[in-house]
């Protein structure tokens, strides 16, 4: 009975990410999240899924220009998926990277542009400024860009996920969530309170570190596993 009640809360938010192709140019998916939540990994998994399952052409933009490791990681994922990655030297303007990658992705005839962003929540003002600038600059191409703004949340952080979502919502129009690390000991109960409080779509869940470990969010299965059924 409890699993049924939980599934009732979760069903309305279980919605796949829209990856349909657009006439006007690449569909732009901006990916946000605090460092360590699994943002880069999720971009890699998403790119793989959209490329392999839907046969779409992907371009990635390395919008976290502050961490050398972030650039390297994203390059590894881009190589694995077999898609192009646009990156600039460390410390360059993330908004310029996003803007220019859109031009390149359009020229290349890409279907989907995935943009990584920096996740330094401890320095909220800078983060806010940078993310706002990325969005503002992208809108110079087209008012409807970004078409999706995803927030990646780590299920093992518990209630912290709420404050992260609150913070990012102040900066960007978050259109959906991806919840990671549901393969660990954490059962991800926070997903229920997130769904209840914010009603934002949960597009997918991360269930491991490998490229295939991104699954659609299944509210009934999730609710059952949460109560140990
Ligand atoms: P970022 O800083 O947000 O870009 O985070 P990363 O993508 O670098 O991931 C941080 C760590 O979490 C890495 O060790 C990943 O392998 C791991 N990770 C990401 N997603 C998952 C997941 O769904 N399950 C598990 N177990 N680990 C994950």
Image (cartoon, rainbow, N blue to C red):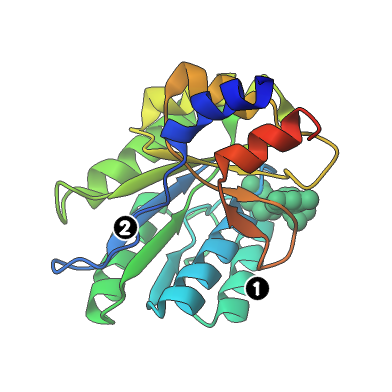
Q: Secondary structure at mark 1?
A: helix
Q: Position of residue 59 (x, y in %)?
A: 41, 72
Q: Point out residue 227 in the picture as x, y percentages from the top left corner.
A: 76, 27
Neighbor class of circle 2 (other Cα within 10 Å; few <14, some 14-19, many 20+) is many
Residue 169 visible in the picture: yes
The residue at which mark 1 appears reads as: 76
Instruction: Give the farthest residue toward the front.
Output: 1
Q: Does 145 appear above or below 125?
A: below
Residue 68 horizontal side relative to residue 62, left or right: right
Along the viewing direction, whichever of 217 and 168 lies nearer the viewer: 217
Q: Element at badge 2? A: strand
Which residue does the numbered mark 2 point to in the structure image? 28
Q: Is disc 1 surrounded by few (<14), some (14 to 19) or many (20+) residues within 10 Å?
A: some
Q: Is residue 156 above or below residue 103?
A: above
- The spot of residue 39 in percent (x, y) is 59, 50
Tell me the residue at 70%/43% (across/down): 36
How many marks on residues? 2
Q: Is residue 226 above or below residue 35?
A: above
Q: Horizontal and vertical percent for residue 51?
A: 46, 76
Q: Quadrant of the N terminus?
A: top right
Q: Quadrant of the C terminus?
A: top right
Q: Nearer the viewer, mark 2 or mark 1?
A: 2
Residue at position x 40%, y 52% in the image: 17
Q: Is mark 1 within 8 Å of ligand 1?
A: no
């Amino acid at each position: 009975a409890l699993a049924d009640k939980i599934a009732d809360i979760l069903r309305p938010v279980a919605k796949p990410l829209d990856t349909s192709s657009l006439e006007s140019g690449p569909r732009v998916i901006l990916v946000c999240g605090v460092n360590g939540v699994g943002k880069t990994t999720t971009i890699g998994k998403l790119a793989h899924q959209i490329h392999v399952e839907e046969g779409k052409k992907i371009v990635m933009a390395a919008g976290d220009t502050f961490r050398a490791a972030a650039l390297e990681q994203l390059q590894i994922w881009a190589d694995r998926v077999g898609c192009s990655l646009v990156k600039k030297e460390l410390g360059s303007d993330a908004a310029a990277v996003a803007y220019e990658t859109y031009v390149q992705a359009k020229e290349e005839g890409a279907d989907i542009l995935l943009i990584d962003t920096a996740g330094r929540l401890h320095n909220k003002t800078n983060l806010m400024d940078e993310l706002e600038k990325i969005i503002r600059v992208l809108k110079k191409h087209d008012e409807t860009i970004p078409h999706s703004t995803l927030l990646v949340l780590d299920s093992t952080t518990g209630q912290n996920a709420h404050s992260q979502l609150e913070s990012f919502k102040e900066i960007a129009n978050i259109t959906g969530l991806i919840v990671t690390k549901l393969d660990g000991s954490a059962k991800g109960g926070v997903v229920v309170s997130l769904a209840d409080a914010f009603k934002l779509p949960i597009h997918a869940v991360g269930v491991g570190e490998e490229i295939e470990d991104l699954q659609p969010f299944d509210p009934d299965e999730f609710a059952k596993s949460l109560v140990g059924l």
